[in-house]
Image (tube, rainbow, N blue to C red):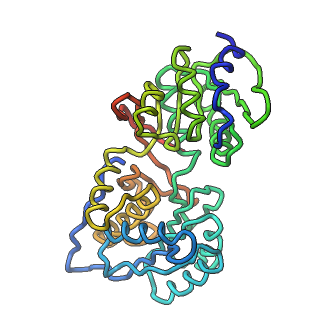
């Protein structure tokens, strides 16, 4: 099959808009207990207040409420800076948050490396020594799915860039791994109102990093071509019609079984269904809890080479503020997603 034919299979819908183990509660020794609080910086007012509340509720599932002090950022840079300044007066051992990319620099500059920061943003550009970017990034899941694909014999991949920020970050990450993995990559830019590009032979696999109907359309149209479809957690869809379309796709994501255990515990305590960002707050607070239990609630403890296990997957903290993540590799089946492997993200 040549590229022109492959692109016809992809054409419908591509212009649409674009983990392992649940952390336990740790029994803290009565001796040498580190009683310093952790400061949770989340928006409790403003348009993302509901999300901020769910993050607070999730954090309190993983860490003793006596050690969690919550500060409202209002979802703005100014509010985040003010919240960080208030938090510092309480002499916290660690700051968890803020949430958005807009807020992170304001908190980093206010804290000035006096306290380690685990920020929930997924903008890896904002990382720096003392400020770890804990959100799941496009680069992490892209590298994880490409490593797995290469281990299964995939040599050539077409990466679909739909113009979204997530897609652009995925394309950049894929390009950085091309030489390391011995892959041949080709980026196909798809924009509303423009013809699909034409080039070369059909690849072994097609990666569409995004979500929604574009992913489902691509999966449907690739079903009988022999081309392997690749996706990221953005494309997870549990609807029966989606599972049928994605049947056979390889997807990098936190393990849904671990997330399901967390979601059940969250619902039992708070009602409602948490999202991935609430799970990040749960994991970050659980890490603080684990470090408190070993009396290593400090940057050195955070960068322990063994890393930490949480519902969003195993993580390891690096000195430059980046976070390495391992992801479950899922195969989409008509009855659900089946974990088949674990792959490391960047």
Position above or below: 271 against 158: below
Q: Residue at x 57, y 75 (%)?
A: 46
> Can you name the residue that lies furthest to the bottom here?
89
> Can you name the residue that lies furthest to the front here?
241
Position above or below: 19 against 69: above
Residue 41 lies left or right of residue 210; in this view the side is left
Q: Which quarter of the picture shows residue 227?
A: top right
Image quadrant holding the C terminus, namely top right
Image quadrant holding the N terminus, namely top right
> Can you name the residue that lies furthest to the right here?
194
Q: How many marks?
A: 0
Nearest the camera: 11 or 31?
11
Position above or below: 70 against 2: below
Q: Residue at x 50, y 27 (%)?
A: 149
Position above or below: 292 against 225: below
Where residue 60 sits in the image (x, y, percent)? Answer: 34, 71
Where residue 98 sits in the image (x, y, percent)? Answer: 54, 70
Q: Which quarter of the picture shows residue 161?
A: top right
Q: Which quarter of the picture shows residue 31?
A: bottom left
Where residue 124 sits in the image (x, y, percent)? Answer: 61, 55
Residue 313 lies left or right of residue 73; in this view the side is left
Q: Residue at x 62, y 25 (%)?
A: 157
Nearest the camera: 254 or 116?
254
Where residue 177 sits in the image (x, y, percent)? Answer: 62, 35
Q: Residue at x 42, y 64 (%)?
A: 281
Nearest the camera: 130 or 173?
173
> Can you name the residue that lies furthest to the top here?
1
């Amino acid at each position: 099959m040549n590229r022109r034919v492959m692109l016809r299979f992809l054409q419908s819908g591509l212009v649409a808009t674009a983990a392992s183990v649940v952390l336990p509660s740790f029994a803290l020794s009565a001796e040498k207990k580190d009683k310093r609080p952790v400061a949770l910086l989340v928006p409790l007012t403003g348009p993302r207040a509901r999300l901020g509340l769910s993050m607070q509720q999730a954090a309190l599932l993983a860490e003793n409420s006596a050690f969690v002090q919550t500060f409202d950022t209002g979802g703005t840079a100014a509010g985040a800076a003010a919240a960080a300044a208030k938090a510092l007066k309480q002499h916290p051992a660690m700051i968890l948050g803020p949430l958005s990319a807009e807020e992170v620099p304001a908190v980093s500059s206010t804290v000035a490396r006096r306290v380690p920061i685990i920020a929930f943003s997924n903008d890896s550009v904002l990382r720096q020594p003392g400020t770890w970017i804990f959100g799941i990034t496009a680069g992490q899941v892209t590298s994880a799915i490409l490593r797995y694909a290469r281990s299964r014999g995939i040599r050539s991949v077409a990466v679909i860039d739909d113009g979204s920020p997530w897609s652009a970050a995925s394309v950049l990450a894929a390009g950085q791994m091309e030489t390391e993995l011995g892959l041949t990559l080709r980026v196909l830019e798809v924009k509303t109102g423009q013809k699909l590009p034409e080039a070369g032979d059909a690849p072994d696999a097609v990666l569409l990093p995004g979500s929604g109907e574009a992913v489902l359309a691509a999966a449907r149209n690739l079903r009988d071509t022999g081309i392997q479809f690749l996706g990221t957690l953005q494309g997870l869809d549990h609807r029966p019609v989606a599972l049928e379309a994605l049947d056979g796709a390889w997807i990098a994501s936190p393990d849904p079984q671990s997330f399901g255990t967390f979601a059940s515990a969250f619902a039992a305590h708070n009602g409602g269904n948490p999202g991935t960002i609430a799970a990040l707050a749960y994991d970050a607070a659980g890490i603080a809890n684990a470090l408190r239990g070993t009396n290593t609630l400090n940057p050195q403890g955070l960068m322990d080479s063994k890393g930490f296990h949480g519902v969003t997957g195993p993580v390891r903290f690096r000195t430059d503020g980046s976070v390495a993540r391992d992801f479950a590799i899922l195969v989409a089946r008509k009855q659900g997603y089946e974990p088949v492997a674990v792959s490391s993200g960047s």
